[in-house]
Image (cartoon, rainbow, N blue to C red):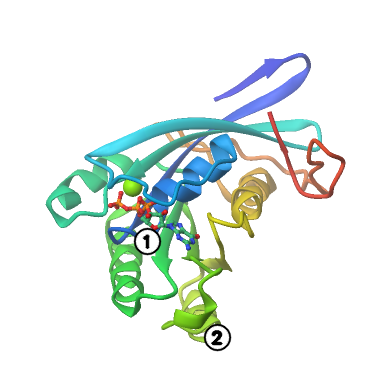
Amino acid sequence: MAATAGGNKIRNAKLVLLGDVGAGKSSLVLRFVKGQFVEFQESTIGAAFFSQTLAVNDETVKFEIWDTAGQERYHSLAPMYYRGAAAAIVVYDITNAASFTRAKKWVQELQAQGNSNTIVALAGNKADLLDTRQVSADEAKAYAQENGLFFMETSAKTATNVNDVFYEIAKKLLQGQQVQNPQGGMVLNQRPPERMVRGGGEECCRIL
Ligand code: GTP
Ligand code: MG
């Protein structure tokens, strides 16, 4: 639902991260929400919740983030998190081909059982580990195009493209690709945002 704070519209958006064990879902969230990275991130149990707001021009998106557990034994919980989600980030590890196969399965599941309005991003994480790459960017990009996803390679470690993924999602949400749904999606907004301004004045995004 839209709310206002200091004249600024706030739009809540439920966002879910899905992907194989160890792909870097929690690390991406930790980077986005706290600006941190830890080498030995513990495997998630069940799911973890975070929230973070992004300002896009004079509007604010408040992401309500569900970081799911990649371990197979938690698979049956996933629908609770992706149902009603305004956006999903499906994460794989570019150094692990099996994680890309798993990511495709998540995309299939979202297409079959999720909300058709959900914006789906594909994130090829650990892009800092180029020497051990197993999944080419071209292959992932082609797959993303065929499936109507938007794609970025990210690194939670170096912060490459992490804010950008969330920013692109916020932009798409505000561009009105998403309509309000009873479980808490986004409100239709006709006016496309031009750009986001990061705290330091750099063009990107301002995390509040
Ligand atoms: P589950 O919770 O088990 O599903 O895993 P996850 O997808 O949340 O992965 P997590 O964030 O726990 O990351 C797994 C390991 O990969 C951790 O040791 C991280 O430090 C490491 N890692 C995550 N992202 C990156 C990255 O971008 N680059 C590098 N080099 N390592 C990363
Ligand atoms: Mg995790």
Residue occupying image coordinates x 53% and y 54%: 156
Q: Amino acid at mark 2?
A: Asp
- Residue of label 1: 23
Where residue 32 sits: x, y (%)? 57, 43
Q: Nearer the viewer, residue 124 or 175?
A: 124
Label 2 sits on a secondary structure element that is helix
Q: Residues within 10 Å of mark 1 (few under 14, many from 20)?
A: many
First of labels 1, 2 by sequence position = 1
Residue 97 in the image: above or below residue 81: below
**Is the shortest distance between ligand 1 and the CB of mark 1 under 8 Å?**
yes
Where residue 121 sits: x, y (%)? 50, 60
Q: Nearer the viewer, residue 60 or 165?
A: 165
Q: Quadrant of the C terminus?
A: top right
Where residue 86 sits: x, y (%)? 48, 44
**Is the shortest distance between ligand 1 and the CB of mark 2 under 8 Å?**
no
Q: Quadrant of residue 55?
A: top right
- Residue of label 2: 138
Residue 13 in the image: above or below residue 23: above
Mark sitting on residue 195:
none
Q: Residues within 10 Å of mark 2 (few under 14, many from 20)?
A: few
Separation of residues labelled 1 and 2 (CA atoms): 19 Å
Q: Amino acid at mark 1?
A: Ala
Label 1 sits on a secondary structure element that is loop
Residue occupying image coordinates x 26% and y 54%: 70
